[in-house]
Image: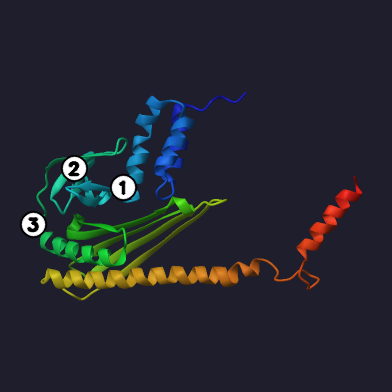
Amino acid sequence: MDAPFSTENKLKIVSKFLLDSPPGEVNDVFNDVRVLMADDAAFQVGILGALREYNTEQYTTVKIDDEEVILSKFGQIKDKVDSYVDPKSRQVFEFDHLRKITRVIEPHPPDETTEPLRSAVEAAITDYVKDHYPNGVSTVYSTEDETITIAIVDNKYNSFNFWNGRWRSTWVVKPESGELKGSLKVNVHYYEDGNVQLNSNKDIEVSTSTTVENPSAAAAAYVRLIGKAENEYQTALNESYIELSENTFKSLRRALPLTRHKLDWDKILNYKIGQELANK
């Protein structure tokens, strides 16, 4: 007889399930794996790391002073795993990943060197997200080596029609060289009478010659590049699905059987019914 799973092995399995949760469904997965674990005390302690990783990687949003802020590793305070920076309100807050409770704990003075550019980029990105993402949220950070990091997330949940989706984009700006490195990610889950997931990502590098002497002009240049790259990515996704629908899927099956005649399914059904009656 096989030995039962240890608590440690169970936690590894349920943590993997949680980290693979589709957009908007992490609570359902959490409740399901909690039942599978069958040890609530160990589960609440052991699942915390996976919840933290999921929330920061998937750009979960929280409200600080009635403004939505993204949870991400870029805002995480070193040596304080559950403390994060809100650059806009210049505050540090704690987030309880298990109970989903947010608490502001202290002010956070900005980096004087990068703050003029960071705040200009924040203003430009905020306008861009409002124009392009119906439910979009953005947070702009001052990060290591005097870089500026932009995080964008937009969620669309439509459980009534059995689908949910999430867009995430991350842009790291090197102001001195004008280089921008982007990572675009799209996750969609469709689950009516099935289980189909789309996970798409693309890394992008672009640059501008605009200098940082004028922060507003530099921010505008960054946003133009970001908008162009993200629009091209979305257009490419749309075109690929048109190709899948109109050509790729059709090539997987014959348009007609080998007889070159369409099957009369009603006639076949009548034959089957007649055969069944004859056998009685």
Question: Which mark is drawn over residue 23?
Answer: none
Local crowd size for mark 2, using a 10 Å CA cut-off: few (<14), some (14–19), many (≥20):
many
Q: Position of residue 267 (x, y in %)?
A: 81, 62
| Label 1 – label 3 distance at C-alpha | 26 Å
Q: Earlier in the sequence, mark 2 or mark 3?
A: 2
Eye-nearest disc, 1 or 2: 2
* Residue found at x 30% / y 70%: 227
Camera-nearest residue between 142 and 95: 95
> What is the three-letter code of the residue carrying label 2?
Phe
The numbered mark at residue 56 is 1
Give how far apart the Cα atoms at labels 1 and 2 are: 14 Å
Separation of residues labelled 2 and 3 (CA atoms):
21 Å
What quarter of the picture does the N terminus occupy? top right
Q: Which residue is mark 3?
A: 112
> Which residue lies at the image location 13% right of the left edge and 50% below the top edge?
90
Image coords of residue 76 (percent x, y): 23, 46
Q: Relative to 130, is 97 above or below?
A: above
What element does badge 2 sit on? strand
Res. 131 in view: yes
Q: Tell me the residue that label 2 is attached to.
A: 93
